[in-house]
Image (tube, rainbow, N blue to C red):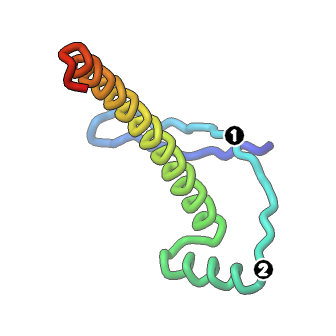
Amino acid sequence: MRCRIHDRSGDPASGSPHRAIVRRVHETTVRFSDELWARVRDASKREGASAAQFVRDATVARIAVDEGVRTLRHDVDAALRRLDERVQAIEHVLRRHGLR
């Protein structure tokens, strides 16, 4: 595992000091077919980024989407449970009054 040092210069107008943030990074190898690599290379050039940065950004975006889907599923499941409870309460009232 390597470390990267990111210079986070303070705003000179505010008088905040310069400081460095050290972040640990993990290296990995990703294999692409020639066709997919060409698409990644072309897309990264259009974005003005390196292919590595493009892949990192795509990974972050994918994780965000997955987390959003999980949150949405949780919200939908909770809403369905509340709806089911309401339906059961209505059915109980209807049975109690002999309407069901």
Residue 24, quarter of picture: top right
Please tell me which residue lies in front, 25 or 72: 72
Q: Which residue is mark 1?
A: 24
Vertically, is 69 above or below 62?
A: above
Please tell me which residue lies in front, 50 or 34: 34
Is there a contact, CB below 8 Å, between mark 2 and mark 1? Answer: no
Residue found at x 80% / y 43%:
1
Q: Is residue 16 left or right of residue 6?
A: left
Q: Which mark is residue 34?
A: none
Q: Is residue 35 left or right of residue 70?
A: right
Residue found at x 20% / y 24%:
99
**Residue at disc 1, secondary structure:** strand
Mark 2 and mark 1: Cα distance apart in space: 29 Å
Q: Which residue is mark 2?
A: 33
Residue 41 placed where, x, y %?
63, 80
Kind of residue indicated by mark 2: Ser
Q: Residues within 10 Å of mark 1 (few under 14, many from 20)?
A: few
Kind of residue indicated by mark 1: Arg
Please tell me which residue lies in front, 23 or 54: 54
Q: Residues within 10 Å of mark 2 (few under 14, many from 20)?
A: few
